[in-house]
Amino acid sequence: MADCNNLFRRYHGEISIGSAKNNKMKDSKEGLRKRIRKWFSENHPDYKPYFYIQGSYKMKNGIRTSEDICDLDDGIYFFREPDVSASTIKEWVRQAVDGYTDTPPENRKKCVRSIFAGDYEIDHPVYLK
C-alpha cells in the first residue's frame, strides 16, 4: 500500500493559511472590534454591538484565493428594537471602520468589508435581533 502522508502534508501546507497571516487577521479583528465599540459608544450609545465569528474561519476551514487573499467573517449583532433602518446601521458600521486601513471599506450587499491590501479582508455582516 502506498504511503501518501508526506504528499498530503505538503499539499495541506500549500493550501492552508499560515500562522503569521492568521495572527495578523486575529489582531486586526480585535482592533476593528475595539474601534467599532468605541465609535458606537461615542455616536450611538443606545446601540451596543456584539460580535460573533462565523463562516469558514469559525469552522477552522479558512479559504484562500489564487491571489492568496483570505477573509474572516465577524458578525455584528444589535439586540434592541431599532429606531432606524437596517441600512442606516450598516452605514454606521462602515463609518466606524473607515480609516482603520489605507483602503476605504466597501459597502457590499450583505456586509461592510474592511480591506487589508493584498493580504486579507474582514467582512462585517450586520444583524438586528
Image (cartoon, helix red, strand yellow):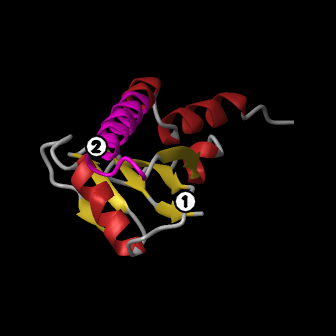
C-alpha distance separating marks 2 and 1 = 17 Å
* Front residue (pair 34, 18): 34
Q: Residues within 10 Å of mark 2 (few under 14, many from 20)?
A: some
Label 1 is placed on what type of residue?
Arg
Marks 2 and 1: which is nearer the front?
1
Q: In the rendering, at what x and y percent does residue 111 appear?
A: 40, 64
Instruction: Determine the secondary structure under disc 1.
Output: loop
Q: Which residue sits at x=39%, y=75%?
A: 85
Q: Which residue is mark 1?
A: 80
**Residue 61 picture quarter:** top right
Where does residue 13 sit, x and y in percent of width and height? 53, 32
Q: Is residue 13 magenta?
A: no
Label 2, on which residue?
A: 39
Place residue 39 in its image quadrant.
top left
Choose between 68 and 102: the one closer to the eye.
Answer: 102
Does 109 sit left or right of 103 as displayed? right
Magenta stretch bounds: 25-46
Task: Provide the major secondary structure of the magenta segment.
Answer: helix
